[in-house]
Image (cartoon, rainbow, N blue to C red):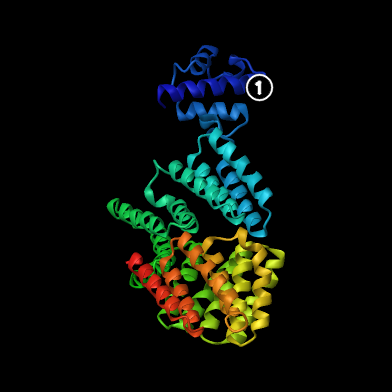
């Protein structure tokens, strides 16, 4: 026990003794003199483990509380509060979750429990994400990273993944990729082969690579993430990984494998009671089924997600489900239904990320191609602007190609050529 720690111990011992109305002799009893207790309280003597045990018993507290000032089992208690806050986020009780996070943060900071404080910052960031406050969430994830700074690098994987996720949602996918790739290099330099940290980081790269159109890298990242599945003993991280790699499996034409991955994720989320993540899994299943032209299964999955969202509302998920269901109806030839569904999504767009917003306007444009080409053009142009704002050149290029086809169908060859040139510029920018 260093001198500064001895001083803290002495102050704590004196305060606890006075709280209980004991004299120095009364605390020492028949074993230790008042002078010895006085030296301990002044920080002039270092107590042995035997002395600490005796004094703790005399004061009626645990040895840990006497040594550190932390009540017994405080860390376990605070971890439980954070778990309860995570469940509150899932239920949509964001005020309750935020209040719990604030309490845990205060107690953890008071007792210098930096790991718990970092986890509280991460949970607070999840509250902000659920509320659609990406910038606030980003700041909280970055604060958590600073709290993890003196700890082994693999412990901050949630903060790193969250930081990258928020930066991508705010429109800078390339920076998000840089952050995740840099973290992988750091883990490699420190020879920290933690399977959970590696799996989470690789799976986070999958979506970012897809957004940038880096399909080969996305495939490689998905394969790397799946390699760690059996060694990663954190169910929620395994479920999230399966959610991410399903996209690659679908891209590779392995629709059945993609659906199996999503069902594994659904099973894990159901077991954890994480309804909001369960909803995301069902939306993803709807997307996969639609890509396989299994519109019956797609409708069932997406309608199930929308029904669940009535109890656990989240604007981004509601818009995604409505948008994907509208796509199913459009591909089935039910254009009026598609437009009605998208009409329900439009009032929620201000609370969604840029990519979801762009996808919704693109789908709305496609739903108007036959009935109102001018409206279709306006909606597709809006989608392109949003994708550019989101720095998503792959999505912008794909939408420009759709716009070029619309111009060509209307006989405006010059506009069609200009639009195709813009699409090529986006592709070159991506490269």
Residue identified by numbered label 1:
19
* 61 up-or-down from 274: above or below: above
Task: Report the residue at 50% width, 80% height from top.
Answer: 406
* Residue 234: image location, x then y, percent: 49, 61
Task: Report the residue at 51% width, 38% height from top.
Answer: 113
Mark count: 1
For residue 245, which quarter of the picture? bottom left
Q: Quadrant of the C terminus?
A: bottom left
Q: Quadrant of the N terminus?
A: top left
* 31 up-or-down from 218: above or below: above
Q: Nearer the viewer, residue 308 or 409?
A: 409
Q: Residues within 10 Å of mark 1 (few under 14, many from 20)?
A: few
* Residue 164: image location, x then y, percent: 44, 55
Residue projecting furthest to the top = 35
Q: Nearer the viewer, residue 11 or 325?
A: 325
* Residue 393: image location, x then y, percent: 41, 66
* Residue 284: image location, x then y, percent: 55, 74
Residue 117 lies left or right of residue 319; in this view the side is left
Task: Report the residue at 70% width, 72% height from top.
Answer: 307
């Amino acid at each position: 026990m260093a001198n500064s720690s001895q001083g803290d111990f002495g102050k704590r011992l004196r305060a606890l003794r006075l709280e209980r109305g004991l004299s120095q002799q009364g605390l020492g009893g028949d074993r230790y003199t008042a002078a010895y207790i006085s030296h301990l309280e002044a920080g002039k003597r270092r107590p042995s483990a035997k002395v600490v045990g005796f004094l703790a018993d005399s004061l009626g507290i645990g040895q840990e509380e006497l040594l550190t000032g932390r009540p017994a089992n405080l860390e376990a208690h605070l971890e439980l509060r954070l778990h309860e806050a995570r469940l509150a986020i899932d239920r949509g009780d964001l005020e309750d979750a935020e209040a719990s996070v604030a309490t845990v943060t205060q107690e953890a900071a008071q007792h210098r429990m930096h790991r718990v404080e970092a986890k509280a910052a991460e949970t607070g960031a999840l509250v902000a994400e659920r509320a659609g406050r990406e910038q606030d969430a980003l700041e909280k994830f970055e604060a958590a990273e600073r709290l993890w700074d003196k700890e082994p690098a693999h412990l901050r994987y949630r903060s790193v993944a969250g930081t990258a996720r928020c930066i991508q949602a705010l429109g800078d996918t390339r920076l998000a990729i840089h952050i995740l790739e840099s973290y992988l290099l750091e883990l490699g330099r420190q020879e920290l082969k933690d399977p959970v940290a590696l799996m989470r980081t690789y799976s986070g790269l999958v979506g970012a690579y897809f957004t940038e159109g880096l399909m080969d890298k996305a495939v490689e990242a998905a394969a790397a993430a799946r390699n760690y599945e059996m060694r990663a003993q954190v169910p929620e991280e395994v479920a999230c990984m399966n959610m991410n790699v399903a996209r690659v499996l679908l891209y590779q034409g392995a629709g059945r494998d993609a659906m199996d991955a999503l069902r594994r994720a659904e099973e894990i989320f159901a077991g954890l009671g994480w309804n909001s993540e369960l909803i995301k899994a069902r939306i993803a299943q709807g997307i996969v089924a639609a890509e396989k032209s299994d519109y019956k299964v797609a409708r069932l999955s997406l309608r199930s997600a929308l029904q669940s969202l009535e109890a656990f509302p989240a604007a981004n998920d509601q818009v995604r489900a409505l948008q994907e269901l509208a796509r199913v109806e459009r591909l089935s030839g039910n254009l009026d239904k598609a437009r009605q569904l998208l009409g329900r999504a439009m009032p929620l767009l201000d609370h969604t990320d840029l990519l979801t917003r762009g996808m919704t306007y693109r789908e709305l444009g496609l739903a108007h191609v036959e009935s109102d080409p001018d409206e279709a053009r306006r909606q597709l142009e809006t989608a392109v602007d949003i994708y550019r704002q989101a720095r998503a050149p792959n999505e912008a290029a794909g939408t420009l190609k759709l716009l070029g086809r619309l111009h060509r169908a209307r006989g405006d060859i010059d506009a069609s050529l200009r639009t195709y040139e813009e699409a090529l510029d986006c592709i070159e920018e991506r490269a």
